[in-house]
Image (spheres, rainbow, N blue to C red):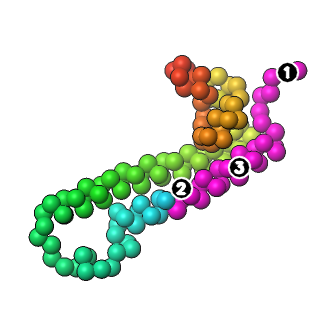
Amino acid sequence: MAEKTRYSDAELEEFREIILEKLAVAKRDYEMLKGGVTNSDGNDTADTSPTFKVLEEGATTLSKEEAGRLAQRQMKFIQNLQAALVRIENKTYGICRATGKLIPKERLRAVPHATLSIEAKQGGIK
């Protein structure tokens, strides 16, 4: 029997469901992180009262910077998941961009936006 060159429509649908679930969670997390950076959910006295505690303000700034970095990382994850959905539509999902072979299902279930097989990723094949 010849080696499979792409996943079946039923398999692609299974991956689409996994990706859509992860995308919903990722978007929710992104909105929460973005809210922490912009302080959109805060409306207490800390927003208006003068604060003279330099260390506290520094910690708040550091916390917002970290939340900003996490939000950027989350947005990249969302974009990668959306790109995976496009590959499903094009029926190119699950094909290693380095080797042209199918990425194992186990890897795609764990990392649904993967574009490289483990061998290609570890071997440095580009």
User: Circle 1 is placed at which residue position?
Assistant: 2
Residue located 49% across and 59% down the image: 29
Specify the amino acid type for callout 1: Ala
Specify the amino acid type for callout 3: Arg
Labelled pair 2, 1 in contact (Cβ < 8 Å): no
Q: Give the quarter of the image for residue 59.
A: bottom left
Q: Residue 83, position in %: x, y?
A: 60, 46
> Which mark sits nearer the N-terminus, 2 or 1?
1
Q: Quadrant of the N terminus?
A: top right
Q: In the figure, is residue 68 to the left or right of 5?
A: left
**Of marks 2 and 1, the one in the foreground:** 2
> Which mark sits nearer the N-terminus, 2 or 3?
3
Q: Give the quarter of the image for residue 102.
A: top right
Residue located 71% across and 49% down the image: 16
Q: Give the quarter of the image for residue 71.
A: bottom left
Q: Is residue 89 visible?
A: no
Labelled pair 2, 3 in contact (Cβ < 8 Å): no
Q: Secondary structure at mark 3?
A: helix
Span of residues in magenta? 1-28
Q: Secondary structure at mark 1?
A: loop
User: Circle 2 is placed at which residue position?
Assistant: 26
Please rate how many residues cluster around mark 3, counting C-alpha atoms within 10 Å: few if below 14, some from 14 to 19, many from 20: many
> Which mark sits nearer the N-terminus, 3 or 1?
1
Magenta-colored stretch includes residue 26: yes
User: Circle 3 is placed at which residue position?
Assistant: 16
